[in-house]
Amino acid sequence: MASLNHTQLEPEDLDVIEGLANETSCPMEEVEKIYAEIHEDLSSRVRIRDYLIVLTSKKVRAVLRQTRRVI
């Protein structure tokens, strides 16, 4: 399992990160960093963790879209 900051990423998370990197044509390291930050933030606030991957990937997509427009 990969770990950034204090977040333990599961194999499913890494699959999602790879998919997001391919989908957005962003470096995997950049996507992984953003994903880990958002995942850590959300996991500290949500009570039901069943949709954590979905919520995290949606927020990562939004961040990547915003940063791509700015550049």
Image (spheres, rainbow, N blue to C red):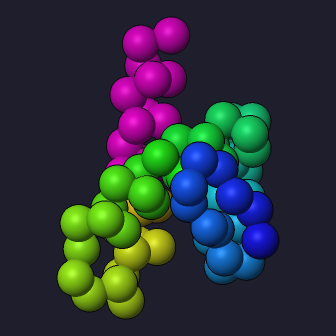
Q: Write down the quadrant of residue 63 in the picture.
A: top left
Whether residue 68 sits left or right of residue 52 in the image: it is right
Number of numbered tags placed on the structure image = 0
Q: Residue at x 61, y 41 (%)?
A: 33
Residue sitting nearer the eye, 63 or 41: 41
Q: Magenta stretch: dominant SS?
A: helix
Which residue is outermost to the top?
Answer: 71
Image position, residue 17 (x, y; %): 65, 58
Q: Residue at x 37, y 89 (%)?
A: 50
Q: x and y percent of residue 26 in the render?
A: 68, 36
Q: Is residue 63 left or right of residue 10?
A: left
Residue at the image position 53 percent from the left and 42 percent from the top: 34
Above or below, 57 against 61 in this view is below
* Vertical side of 1 occupied by 48: above or below: below
Q: Is residue 60 visible?
A: yes
Q: Residue at x 72, y 50 (%)?
A: 22
Determine if residue 20 is in view: no
Q: Does residue 43 lie above or below 50 as drawn?
A: above
Residue stretch in magenta: 59-71
